[in-house]
Amino acid sequence: MNGTNNDVLVRVEDLVMHFPIYRGVIRRQVGAVRAVDGVSFEIRQGETLGLVGESGCGKSTTGRAMLQLYKPTSGRVYFQGQDLVELRSEPMRLMRRHLQMIFQDPYASLNPRMTVRDIVGEPLMAFGQASGKEIDARAAELLELVKLNPDFSGRYPHEFSGGQRQRIGIARALALNPSFIVCDEPISALDVSIQAQIVNLLEDLQKEFQLTYLFIAHDLSMVRHISDRVAVMYLGVIVELASRNDLYHNPLHPYTQALLSAIPVPDPAWGETHQRTVLQGDVPSPVNPPSGCRFRTRCPIADSHCAEERPVFREIEPDHYVACLKV
Amino acid sequence: MTTVEQAATSNNLKRETQLSLAWRQFKRHKLAVFGLCVLPIFILVAVFGNWIMPYDPNAVAADGVIGMPQPPSRKHLLGVDLYGRDMVSRLISGAQISLSVGFVSVGIALIIGLILGSLAGFYGGIFDTLITRLADIFLSLPRLFLIMIVNSYLPPNIYNVMVVIGLFSWMNIARLVRGEILKIKTLDYIHASTALGASSGSIILTHMLPNAFAPVIVATTIGIPYAILLESALSFLGLGVMPPQASWGNILYEARQWISVAWWYWVPPGVLISLTVLCFNFIGDGLRDAFDPTLRGK
């Protein structure tokens, strides 16, 4: 594989992100948190790829390592054919105008000592694209774009509600007209009533500016709403990746089946005809993951073979990838 | 956005800046306000001391009396010392020394501490290990003893005292800055700035230092009295400011033999040292409260 395919905007190849653990006086490395352990996927121009999984499964780390906020342990991340991992810091910085990010926590991701105008204008300053009055004008324009009152540009983040702050974060991400945005759980810190507004805003902006999203979330129904394709992560690896309808109607991996069966259904009669798969136990520690298949310790259909061989992530049906020995 | 949200934020509440919030909190600390009133008087007296002094502080035998301190009189409001020098003038001259030692040596400590602390915090790794261990070593050694050794190799003058005190006082500030930077480094808005393409320099200047500054100001304020005390102790031991130059510490040193007979000789410098140190500490406490958002509105 190389990173040059017209249709593909971002290609991730075997991305690994280990965080070393040090102990003792001389800070000897005694192990590593295997947050992301060999992840490959591609994101096509203009689509939304949903990335779901339990908390701690490495989905946010994947997003951050793709944008080189963490230096990946190994692997390749191609953006428009250019490998981001091998870029030195200044070329990478210049590349960032095309790659932006929306953060999970709208309280922590805005500097409390800066006004909204300065926050939204920071990307413009960083690339010397505007100064003084131009930033004022552009900031007002961006605030209007995310449906905030441009008169608020002199205010500080603490004067806004969570949903409004998330809009400020979105305005900041849009300032440089990027082509790819990593949305790192942009709605999970918000009230349910606000979540739909933000998701709709993201969809509108995608249509208007032909944006490509990596949408990280743990809310399966929200992901179903916004995504074109969905990847399911478990303990640092992707276990299944398929188009939205395929994944939700025909899940092949036992973990995906369990996740989908856990979605509450507002229909009392549903329980009589359907069986919920309830997973036992907790997610194992990413410091010392199980041998073979990561999911075998909680899998309802695992046998001794699953402990020996690591399943290959392969295409089982057209455009439907699964990593399971039993499928 | 809902109309309710619009209304809530467009409702023009009295907008307060961080600074005015801090000032309001500071004013609640009565002793800090006391410090803020008294300290400028000392500073003004020190700055304009040369015009206020009634006599030359180093002029021996102003009244022809040597060898016996003289009690306060109309001519000499706080008496004269062992060598017949006017005490008021010597105390003012001592104020100049003590305050400049406080400010200059803490200024030196602040510069060293800011640089080493931000290096350790921002770059981490080997920088962090080296700088933290160095600070630990400096902190584990008795400071006064070290300064005495270093000073005994240097020509004894006031500038050396300032520099040496500064060189041995940076550890707390460096540790504090390191801690603050480490804390801020993990915050999402730093990641956000990196992700949107800001350079390291602008991240340190626009995001890290402004957010790390409040505790550093507090530490600096509390560092000044320690430096003043150190200078007094050194001068008292005869290793600081050299006679005939006066400092509050060496006035005390000279007065030690006359404690029972000449109160006017040792009480004023002692009171001035205590009062200055207390004022700085009160202001430091007040600033710490003022910058602590968890105390606001209580």
Image (cartoon, grey):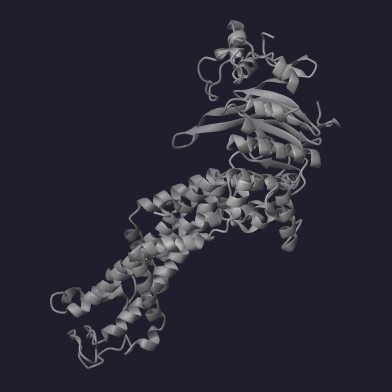
Relative image position of residue A162 (x, y in whole percent): 58, 43
State which quadrant residue A78 falls in.
Answer: top right
Q: Please tell me which residue is depicted at 63% across the width and 18% down the height of the picture.
A: A260
Q: Quadrant of the C terminus of chain A?
A: top right
Relative image position of residue A276 (x, y in whole percent): 58, 12
Relative image position of residue B289 (x, y in whole percent): 40, 57
Q: Nearer the viewer, residue B77 or A316?
A: A316
Q: Quadrant of the N terminus of chain A?
A: top right
Q: Please tell me which residue is depicted at 47% across the width and 64% down the height of the picture.
A: B108
Q: In this view, does A282 lie above or below A4?
A: above
Q: Which of B93 and A118 is in front in this view?
A: A118
Q: Is residue A127 above or below residue B188?
A: below
Q: Please tell me which residue is depicted at 39% across the width and 76% down the height of the picture.
A: B43
State which quadrant residue A121 falls in.
Answer: bottom right
Farthest right residue in view: A6
Relative image position of residue A279 (x, y in whole percent): 55, 15
Q: In this view, does B97 lie above or below B176?
A: below
Farthest top residue in view: A304
Farthest left residue in view: B260
Q: Nearer the viewer, residue A129 or B129?
A: A129
Total numbered circles: 0
State which quadrant residue B71 falls in.
Answer: bottom left
Would you say residue B85 is visible in this rendering? yes
Q: Please tell me which residue is depicted at 75% across the width and 31% down the height of the picture.
A: A48
Q: In this view, does B131 lie above or below B286?
A: above
Left or right position of B232 against B114: left
Would you say residue A85 is visible in this rendering? no
